[in-house]
Amino acid sequence: MTSRERITFTLNHEIPDRVPLDLGGSGVTGMHVSTVYKLRQALQLDKPGTPVKVIEPYQMLGEIAPDLIDALGVDVVELTGRGTMFGFDKEGWRPWEFFDGTPVLVPAGFNTDPEPDGRILMYPKGDKSAPPSGQMPHNGFYFDTIVRQEPLDEDQLSVEDNLEEFGPLKDEEIEYFRNEAERLYNQTDKAIFASFPALGFGDIALVPAPWMKYPKGIRDIEEWYFSLAARQDFVMEIFERQCEISLANLARLYEAVGDRASMVFVTGTDFGLQTGPFISPKSYCTLFQPFHHRLNDWIHQNTPWKTFIHSCGSIIDLIPDMLDAGFDVLNPVQTAATGMDPVVLKKRFGDRVVFWGGGVDTQRTLPFGTADEVRQEVRERLRIFGEGGGFVFNTVHNVQPNIPVENVLAMYETVRDFGGY
């Protein structure tokens, strides 16, 4: 089978020739740049010291280039916009060295030097005249959002302030997606995973808007979570307006991308903690499910795309309502969280949802286990989730830094050797 056929079979709950593999198909199924560098060196794809591109500076994700895709047998490629979470484009590449010595290439907008205390500050759109919107501590691995919440006047809250980042896509943005979809479809045999802007409702990584110079509205993380309980009517009005904008954008995007994409990333809003959901099923059904339902219904009625939801944590009590909202694919399948037992998940939901992730635990096994323990867990997950189809192998969320490369190699070797049906 081609990769595209393999993913199509899997998304339709049919059994392909082997379990498909994703690495880098989205911003939640990628790999930290330092680990990409070590993996490329171990596979002898580069000479020592050859830098790797940082394609998403917020999470410091490394580029999964075509030669690495071929070397690992990856079945998915990402269709996404040209920008980053900090608002500058992926262009104007220049050399930079990570704290651990990893040589990388960063976009021109990544234009900061360490502060006196060793921190790296990041500025929206690379504009140093604006307040910084992100910071990486000295010897850190990721950027933390800097909350830039203006004082709130309860009587002057405006829905428009929290809609400033949403709006009709520009013609040049639509054309970019059209051209990229054609390129990926014609130049590869991979399934195309589309990530379009502004679909997720209340994604806490997006609420502070690190790409905006002077965001207005409710931008503080704690204040936003408080609003889910105390300002529900206000939040639902934001979601209602956002949904209308998103539906109009989806119609234009489908006209541009067409049937070339296999799947679309609808939301990355996290609903789970390590020990349980942070929102009750009732609150999910009140605040989020109606809007998820509308987007999923439009996509299913007008396109062949399958719909993807990413939610970390213990969400087993929310999964039935998520599936009733029309989601086809669940990620990252955080099996170390309370109640997220692979056997139970597959038995209860395997006929209704494709599990995209859960292939190995990234909190314990992959970073701290032995290579043999990694192999054993990967084989077990292939057996459980792969039964009857409906499983795409990916780790639990992005592959982290500081992972022994022997463990990373053991993971992909096991998928290759034991992923066949």
Image (tube, grey):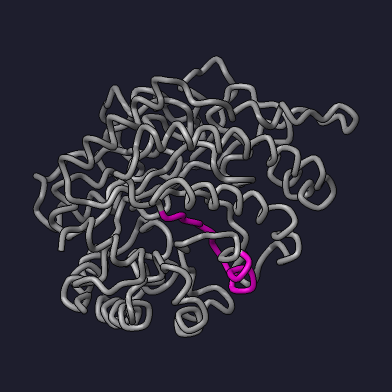
Q: Is residue 314 magenta?
A: yes
Above/below status of 251 relative to 270: above
| Residue 149 appears left or right of 126 | right
Picture residue at 35% right of the left edge, 49% below the top: 193
- Residue 269 in picture, x, y percent from top left: 58, 52
Picture residue at 66% right of the left edge, 67% below the top: 277
Report the span colored magenta. 306-321
Q: Residue furthest front?
A: 301
| Residue 115 appears left or right of 166 | left
Residue 374, by quadrant, is bottom left
Judge by depth and name the residue closer to the eye, 26 or 33.
Answer: 26
- Residue 331 in picture, x, y percent from top left: 46, 62
Residue 366 shows up from this direction: no
- Residue 56 in picture, x, y percent from top left: 39, 39
Above/below status of 76 relative to 179: below
| Residue 124 appears left or right of 37 | right
- Residue 111 in picture, x, y percent from top left: 40, 23
Q: Quadrant of the C terminus?
A: bottom left
Residue 303 shows up from this direction: yes
Q: Quadrant of the N terminus?
A: bottom left
Picture residue at 39% right of the left edge, 20% below the top: 172
Judge by depth and name the residue closer to the eye, 173 or 32.
Answer: 173
